[in-house]
Image (cartoon, grey):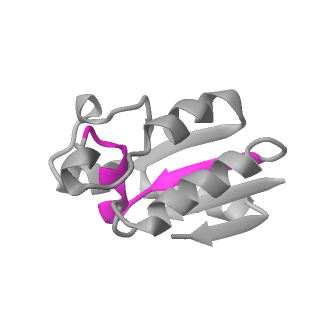
């Protein structure tokens, strides 16, 4: 089963943390596409979580490599925010909106965060 997670909102909220946690769990038995668009792209940058007094995503992102989760950043969202590949804390694949639409169409379940 292919599941698409679309993270588009506030990256420093409980929703983003839960999206990563659930995607990691589902990635054990399913193919998971984790796509970050709009302000969601900030979740993967080298931000300083301790300055916001919240937990970071490092451990969750580190473990994505052990399961079947692929990370994607929508290229226009990153560009509009002045973000480049080196601004991200993890290795991500940049995709255009047409690719995101194809992922949406080929997924059996879509979760928007």
Q: Residue at x 66, y 57 (%)?
A: 22
Residue at the left extreme? 82
- Report the span colored magenta: 31-46
Residue 36 among magenta residues: yes
Q: Residue at x 34, y 33 (%)?
A: 89
Residue 14's image quarter?
Answer: bottom left
13 relative to 113 in the view: left or right: left
Tell me how many marks there are.
0
72 relative to 38 in the view: left or right: right
Q: From the top left corner, tell me how far across and down residue 75 is, in percent.
A: 34, 48
Q: From the top left corner, tell me how far across and down residue 67 is, in percent.
A: 71, 34
87 relative to 12 in the view: left or right: left
- 61 or 6: nearer the viewer: 61
46 relative to 107 in the view: left or right: left
Q: Is residue 26 visible?
A: yes
Q: Residue at x 49, y 58 (%)?
A: 17
Residue 10's image quarter?
Answer: bottom left
- 62 or 6: nearer the viewer: 62
Residue 53 among magenta residues: no
Q: From the top left corner, tell me how far across and down residue 12 is, in percent.
A: 33, 61
Q: Residue at x 39, y 59 (%)?
A: 37
Q: From the top left corner, tell me how far across and down residue 80 is, in percent.
A: 19, 56
Q: Is residue 110 above or below residue 35?
A: below
- 9 or 77: nearer the viewer: 9
Q: Is residue 56 above or below residue 18?
A: above
Q: Is residue 76 visible?
A: no
């Amino acid at each position: 089963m292919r599941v698409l997670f679309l993270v588009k909102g506030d990256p420093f909220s409980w929703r983003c943390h839960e999206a990563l946690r659930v995607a990691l769990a589902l990635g054990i038995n399913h193919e998971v596409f984790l796509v970050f668009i709009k302000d969601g792209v900030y979740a993967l940058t080298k931000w300083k979580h301790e300055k916001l007094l919240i937990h970071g995503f490092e451990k969750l992102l580190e473990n994505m490599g052990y399961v079947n989760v692929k990370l994607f950043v929508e290229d226009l969202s990153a560009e509009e925010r002045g973000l480049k590949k080196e601004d991200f804390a993890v290795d991500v694949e940049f995709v255009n909106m047409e690719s995101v639409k194809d992922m949406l169409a080929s997924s059996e379940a879509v979760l928007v965060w």
